[in-house]
Image: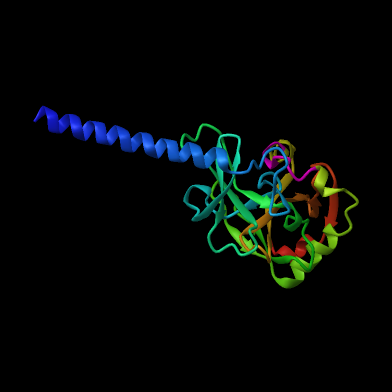
Amino acid sequence: MKGIFKKILVDFIALLGAFILFLLIRFFTLPRLDPTYVYNGHEYYYIIGKFETSRNQSSVAREKAVARFYDAIIYTIKDDPDEFYLSPKVILAHLPYNLLGRRDMMQPPTEENVDHIDINVSKGDEPSWKTMDLSTQHALLEAYSKSTIDPTEYELINMFPTVDKWQAKTDYEIFDVRIWFKKPNDLYYNLLIIKIGNEYGLLLEDGETLIEFDGSLLGL
């Protein structure tokens, strides 16, 4: 009995060792994505800051391993013909890896690349998203097009400190805005609308500049 148990244990250890060796060989033979962030001739970067996606990184369906990134293996994603997304995965998730997106497709919102715009009209903790009608969407994008700020300088800035700063002001109301892109259709861009008295302004990427916006169209 002891001999059988010992044989099973040895076989298990051998299989485990072979599996670990396979993972190590695959990891170290993959091309590095860092520090260039380039795959298939396209530059990638984390989807953070002004850009976010509705895709869940933890449940995303991966296609194939294509690169390594520090201690992560980078995968393409199933049903992603443009290879917009790349998904980092580590065995021990000790670092906050996010999805990566193609920089050439992560552009500021325009009439041509926007599918629809949602605004959070909730007054409480739970968000309540309302889709703007086409005339309101057009007015907001027209206001945004008047910006003289280079959005690429601020696109990686976290929105939370900006929201906290404006919420600390009195007589101000803040509305989160998600500007959804046509392609990929699960990518959106974060901005804020600030209501001061009866006046509305679209808050630009620097967190300071307001562009006047006809808020009466929102019906709030």
Residue 156 in the magenta stretch? The answer is yes
**Residue 206 falls in image quadrant:** top right
Residue drawn at point x = 78 percent, y = 50 percent? 197
Q: How is the image coloured?
A: rainbow
**Residue 156 falls in image quadrant:** top right
Q: Where are the magenta residues, as a range?
A: 154-161
The quarter of the rendered structure image containing the N terminus is top left
- Point out residue 211 in the picture as x, y percentages from the top left corner: 85, 53
The quarter of the rendered structure image containing the C terminus is bottom right
Pick the front one: 190 or 89: 89
Residue drawn at point x = 56 percent, y = 37 percent? 28
Pick the front one: 180 or 105: 105
**Residue 12 falls in image quadrant:** top left
Residue drawn at point x = 11 percent, y = 27 percent? 2
- Point out residue 108 in the picture as x, y percentages from the top left corner: 78, 56
Residue 158 in the magenta stretch? The answer is yes
On screen, residue 89 versus residue 202, left or right, reads: left
- Point out residue 96 in the picture as x, y percentages from the top left corner: 57, 36
